[in-house]
Image: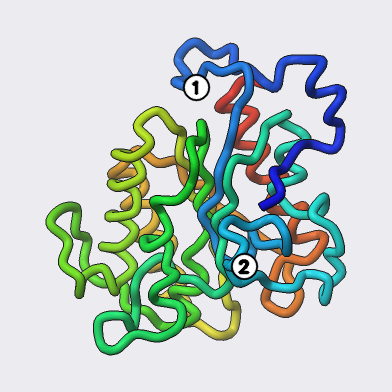
Amino acid sequence: MKRLIPVLAMAVLMSACVKPNNSTNPIDADEVHFSILGDSYSTFEGYVDPETNDVWHYQNIGVTSAEQMWWHQMAVEMGWIMDVNNSFSGSLICNYRDFDGGDFYAPNSFIHRMDHLGNPDVIFILGGTNDVWQDAPFGDFVYADWTDEQLCAYRPALAYLFAHLKSLHPHAKLYFLLETNPCPGDITEETRLNLVESTHRIANHYNVECIDLTIHKNWWHPDVQGQSDIARQVLEALKVDFNV
């Protein structure tokens, strides 16, 4: 995978790469490295790890370079460096359909890939849209002793994801990036509200910051404006948290 280095590399190298000056922030490094656990919204050919991950071809909707992706825009603005982008097009948070026979996406779920994020200071998780798109069950709120069957539902799988990442990366700051109106016209308002409220509740339980996103899309994916929408909303939260 190509490691993301901001376009203004020389300027970044000649200055500090954003060292948070808020003493209460647990991250205190000269260079902040971030990783992404995501779906198609974060894929770009040549910029996923492992390289065998499925990517969505953004060139079809006008996103023709990695520099237009939300994570590149964010990295340049913050002066951060990408560690791992483990995004897989079409993937769900949960293992839906895995328990009763499986399909192509279940083995590539977020919870199957969450061990492979490198050693980041910040982890961005951008997902959930495919869970409601594929009609995965929401399941119950379960915070321990998860069964294989429970991990085929969104709520238990999201809790399992947060618990595991918190244990594996105890010093990393976690952000869940939530599209608050996914699949408009294809899911009910009840489903949309369930997604938003469930995600907020579970994120709050694990003290994971949830950034709600409104995204302009073309062919169900963030286009040039949509990628900038994500970057802008993420940056708004980061600049407050990191006092920059």
Give the answer, above or below, for where 188 lies relative to 69. Answer: below
SS of the residue at dot 1?
loop
Nearer to me, 22 or 112: 112
Q: Is residue 20 left or right of residue 12?
A: left
Query: As shown in the figure, which amino acid type bears the numbered disc 2?
Result: Ser
The residue labelled by disc 2 is: 40
- Tell me where residue 96 appears, x and y as whole percent: 34, 78
Q: Is residue 148 above or below residue 100?
A: above
Please state the horizontal and vertical placement of residue 212, each as a whole percent of the image: 55, 52
Instruction: Return the x and y of residue 17 as percentages of the image width and height.
Output: 70, 22
Q: Residues within 10 Å of mark 1 (few under 14, many from 20)?
A: some
Spot the residue most to the left.
Answer: 145
Q: Quadrant of residue 58?
A: bottom right
| Mark sitting earlier along the chain (1/2) | 1
Q: Answer whether residue 238 is visible to the viewer in this image.
A: yes
Q: Residue 67 bears which disc, if any?
A: none
Q: Is residue 49 left or right of residue 6?
A: left
Say which quarter of the image contains residue 199: bottom left
Q: Nearer the viewer, residue 116 or 71?
A: 116
Residue hosting label 1: 27
The amino acid on which the numbered mark 1 sits, given as a three-letter code, is Ile
Q: Quadrant of residue 208?
A: top left
